[in-house]
Each structure stands twice: as structure tokens, then as C-alpha cells.
Image (tube, coloured by chain):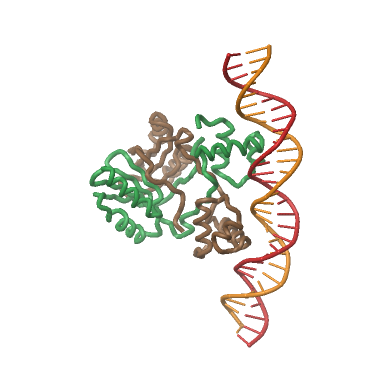
Chain colours: A green, B brown, C red, D orange
Amino acid sequence: MTQLSILESRMLAILQSDASISMSELARQTNSSSATCWRRLREMEEAGVVSAPVRLVDPAKVGRGMDAFCQVRMKAQDADARSAFQRAMDLEPAIVEVYSISGDWDYLLHIVVKDIPDLENILMTRIHELDCVATASTMFVLRRVKHTTRIPV
Amino acid sequence: MTQLSILESRMLAILQSDASISMSELARQTNSSSATCWRRLREMEEAGVVSAPVRLVDPAKVGRGMDAFCQVRMKAQDADARSAFQRAMDLEPAIVEVYSISGDWDYLLHIVVKDIPDLENILMTRIHELDCVATASTMFVLRRVKHTTRIPV
DNA sequence: CTATTGCTGAAATGATTATTTCATAACTCT
DNA sequence: AGAGTTATGAAATAATCATTTCAGCAATAG
């Protein structure tokens, strides 16, 4: 995918907020036709630009009302350590985002938990447990000020 | 919503990965019936437990291949400053997540941009520009190690 | 033990929708 | 300018699907 056309940008803006609308409604909102929207959407799906529809769960409503961010420093950054770390992250569903970052720390983790004991448990069993990890520092989230999955297009 | 039933948990686990399936397919995968799945889903939507279907865009495929996290310290934390800050965050679509956090900093921001000049521009015009902001420190994301919207249920 | 209430799922329904086809329009390249 | 290529949208089609109804079942309370 070289560059998004105006039509494609508009389609993505709409579908990132509501993917339940029909092709004809999407066509109406983009001044296009149902057939063209359908073809464009299929192309973007195949190119991996846009996902299949998903539903988003409100963590607070399902007993995951607490967020934390955890910064991690590694003992070593060789390939083995990195892949061991990655595997550990993939295994824990409460760790929803992991970024390798520049600066004083090696990784930044976003963790979604029920409460402090739950967090403590994940920190101990999933992070401090690892041989490759040297230190970790945790920030508690006091409030979700803004939270969106919409990427500007 | 008091507590999630087994059926509801299974439904959410599936719908967080793929919301394009039909009620009958959802029923099949949960050993339930189409009618019951339909009713449960409507209840969960009404209770705000689960969103309408949305599509997720791959930032790298639409020219937003760079992520940054920015920590912000405020001059003051009075109600006016907080609401001014919140308003500024809401206005900038490149800032996708904002958390009020414990510790040395007041806020943690997740920013999705095209490149460094783009990031610089947002930092200057949207953050340092604000009267309520004292200091900010930015971490560059080197790699997205893990990134999911699926909340464990 | 019985009455009541609420939940379940199979089947019916009725509408909506994705998807294809085809004639036309727009554009590209020589 | 004109031949060739590609994209467009209106209409047709063929399925699929959400939603309702209803009879039976389970659980609860009196």
C-alpha cells in the first residue's frame, strides 16, 4: 500500500469508530458506491492495513479496573535474552502492550489487572522471575484520562 | 453487571478477536444457542461491557510508524489545570492514550506519529505550549514487542 | 409440593446485505 | 489524439443473518 486515497482515509476513519455499518451506509457517508467501498475494504484487509472487526471490552466492567506501567532493565541484551523476554510477555494476557524503548530503561510494559495483589503476582511470577531481567520499576495508573484505538488517517 | 458468566466470558474472548462471525457461529463455539448469544450480547452492549464492532488500523501501514511515550510534570494540579490539560489531550488525535500516574511524573502519554519532526511538532504545540505544564520527558519506541486490545476475561 | 418467574433453544420470519456483473467513464501512455 | 487499461457505480442475485415467537424447562419462593 503506497499511500491512502481520500476515500480510503474516510473509510478508515469511520470503520475505526463503527464497523457495524453496511457497505451501502459506508458508501453514503463517503460519497461513493457500495461496490467500490467493498473492493477498497477487501484490498486494505489483504494488505493488512485494517483488521477484521473486533469488539473492545471495558476492563473496569470485567474486573480489570487497575492499570500499571512497568519499566524493565535487562541484565544483557543478547538475542537469547530478548527472545526469552518476548516469550514471557506473550504468555501473560494481563500484559497487553510491550515496547522496547530508548533511554534509561529497556522495556515499557502496560499491564491490566484486578487489584494490587494481582499486579504483585504478575510482577513476581512474570518479570522478576526472569533471569534476563535486572531491575523493574512500576507506575500505578490513577486515572485513564484518554484511551482510544483510533489512529489518525 | 455483577459478574461474568462462563458463557459471557467465552463470548467476549471470541468477539475480542473476531466480531465478524454470525450469532449461530458464536453459539456453536460457545455450546449455546443463537438466541441466547444474541440476548447476552445485547445486554453486555447496553451495560457498556463491550463496544460495537470496530476495525483496527495498522499505524505503520498508514504512515504512523513511530511511537513515543511522554512523561509530563505539571506546574500545579488544581482543577483548572487538570481540565485544561485534558482538553488539550482530547484535541490531538496523535495522542492516543493519556494516564494520570503515581510517582515522579503526573501523566504518561502515548503518541503515534509519522517521524521525529512530526513528534517534535506535537510536543511543542500540544504539550510544552501549555501553561499548566512544567516539564516533559520523551521515550522513543524502538520496537513494538507486543500490542493487543484483548482484555483477559 | 406447587405456583411463579425467568431462562433456554428450535424454528419461523422477514429484512438486510455482501458480492457479482456489466456498461460506462476516467485515465494513461505512446 | 487514440488505443488500451483500469476504476466506477447501478442494478441484479443469491445468501445470510439478526430477531421474534413460543413451548418447554429450571430454579426459586411460599
Residue A128 in the image: state x and y as whole percent.
27, 54
Which residue is rendered at x = 40% and y = 31% of the image?
B115
Asked whether residue A26 is in view, the answer is yes
Camera-nearest residue between A99 and B79: A99
Q: Is A150 on the left or on the right of B129, as rendered?
A: right
Does A32 appear above or below B21? above
Residue A41 in the image: state x and y as whole percent.
58, 38
Q: Quadrant of residue C13?
A: bottom right
Does A87 appear above or below B65? below
Which residue is rendered at x = 37% and y = 52% of the image?
A68
Residue B109 in the image: state x and y as whole percent.
40, 42
Camera-nearest residue between A13 and C16: C16
Asked whether residue B136 is in view, the answer is no
Residue C18 in the image: state x and y as whole percent.
63, 44
Q: Is B58 on the left or on the right of C23, as rendered?
A: left
Q: Is A133 on the left or on the right of C21, as rendered?
A: left
Count the marks: how many? 0
Which residue is rendered at x = 53% and y = 44% of the image?
B55
Q: Is B2 on the left or on the right of D25, as rendered?
A: left
